[in-house]
């Protein structure tokens, strides 16, 4: 079968970005807001003697504020940007709007990537500033927590009654480091894994090839059958570097995914969208679809994939409207859960 060729011109349509489960957030926010207003404006509230008279008013004020902020943030994020322009999802026959199921796939609750201009080209890269900020905040909180908690343990009555103050301090610090330090170290590793498990796409200024760097754990089921399109190398850290001719890139696809994984409590399900790099092939299967994004931020994901497609000069194949989500919900009923995945 000859390779599928890139379509130079394509019709553009406009669709609404569907956000599954948004009604739950709006309902909760509305209930909190109304309950807070009703409680705060009530003429009199019976208060138990143990509570201060102003405590119920403060509680309802905070409840209403939480509900109002929830509604306001949702409106600011979704209402102005619910529509998007894109190519017809079916413009390439045989390219289905379904996610690529990959063992170990992790869904992130926030946007993980951004576009960045570089001296020798541009990159689709992880949001390193947010990752670094998270690590700095965790470090600052951890140091403060360790100091305060160690002090509380050291000067507690049981320790002061049975040990000299120097030994009490040493025991308090040791207990805090073993317990709290372990938890903070695990949290740090989770944040670091976020950076290590994200792909990086580099496009040089000559715009002949792109370089896609993926983690060592990244595997595709047909890895041996796309050597005619992608040149594979491995760097010293074990990450794979795939060099792809830009002329072989057919489009950027965004697919809905009702993500399901096995967990200790059974199956865990969430909604996500998957961004895919669509590459032409010379083998029996005409398309190679490479996952480059998996997030629960539906609106920002659509915007970012649209911008990436514009940068590459290829169609943006959007499948995130209400009809596509309904079709994905039906497909997910017969789909096995992801092995070794996670939700962060």
Image (spheres, rainbow, N blue to C red):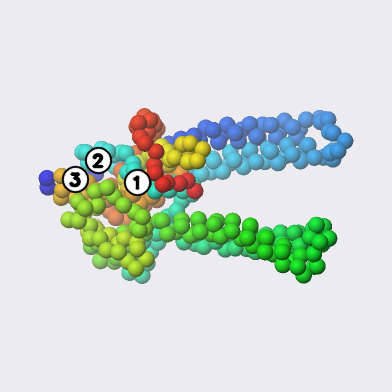
Secondary structure at badge 2 equals loop
Of labels 3 and 2, earlier in sequence is: 2
Disc 1 designates what residue? 102
Disc 2 designates what residue? 95
Crowdedness near tag 1: few (<14), some (14–19) or many (≥20) residues, C-alpha within 10 Å: some
Query: From mark 3 to mark 1, how far is it between C-alphas?
Result: 19 Å
Q: Residue furthest right?
A: 49
Name which residue lies at 71% across and 59% down.
Answer: 149
Residue 141's label in the rendered image is: none
Tell whether 184 sits left or right of 35: left
**Comparing marks 3 and 1, which lies closer to the viewer?**
1
Q: Foreground residue, 206 or 270?
A: 270
Position of residue 254 relative to residue 335, above or below, is below
Of labels 1 and 2, earlier in sequence is: 2
Disc 3 designates what residue? 286
Crowdedness near tag 3: few (<14), some (14–19) or many (≥20) residues, C-alpha within 10 Å: some
Whether residue 156 appears in this view of the structure is yes
Q: Quadrant of residue 69?
A: top right
């Amino acid at each position: 079968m000859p390779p599928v060729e890139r379509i130079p011109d394509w019709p553009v349509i406009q669709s609404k970005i569907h956000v599954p489960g948004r009604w739950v957030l709006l309902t909760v926010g509305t209930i909190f807001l109304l309950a807070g207003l009703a409680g705060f404006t009530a003429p009199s509230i019976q208060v138990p003697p143990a509570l201060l008279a102003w405590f119920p008013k403060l509680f309802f004020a905070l409840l209403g504020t939480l509900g109002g902020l929830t509604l306001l943030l949702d409106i600011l994020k979704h209402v102005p940007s619910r529509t998007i322009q894109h190519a017809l999802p079916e413009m390439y026959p045989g390219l289905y709007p379904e996610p690529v199921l990959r063992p170990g796939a992790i869904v992130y609750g926030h946007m993980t990537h951004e576009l960045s201009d570089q001296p020798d080209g541009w990159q689709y890269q992880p949001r390193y500033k947010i990752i670094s900020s998270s690590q700095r905040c965790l470090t600052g909180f951890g140091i403060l927590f360790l100091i305060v908690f160690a002090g509380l343990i050291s000067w507690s009555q049981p320790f002061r009654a049975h040990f000299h103050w120097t030994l009490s301090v040493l025991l308090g610090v040791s207990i805090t480091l073993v317990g709290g330090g372990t938890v903070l170290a695990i949290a740090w590793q989770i944040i670091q894994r976020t950076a290590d498990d994200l792909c990086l796409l580099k496009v040089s200024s000559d715009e002949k090839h792109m370089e896609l760097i993926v983690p060592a754990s990244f595997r595709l089921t047909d890895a041996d059958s796309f050597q005619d399109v992608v040149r594979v190398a491995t760097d010293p850290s074990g990450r794979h570097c795939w060099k792809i001719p830009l002329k072989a890139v057919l489009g950027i696809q965004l697919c809905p995914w009702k993500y399901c994984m096995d967990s200790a409590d059974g199956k865990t399900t969430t909604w996500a969208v998957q961004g895919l790099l669509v590459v032409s092939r010379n083998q029996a299967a005409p398309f190679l679809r490479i996952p480059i994004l998996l997030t629960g931020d539906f609106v920002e994901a659509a915007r970012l994939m649209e911008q990436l497609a514009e940068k590459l000069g290829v169609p943006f194949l959007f499948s995130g409207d209400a009809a596509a989500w309904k079709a994905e919900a039906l497909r997910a009923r017969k789909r096995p859960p992801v092995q070794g995945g996670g939700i962060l």
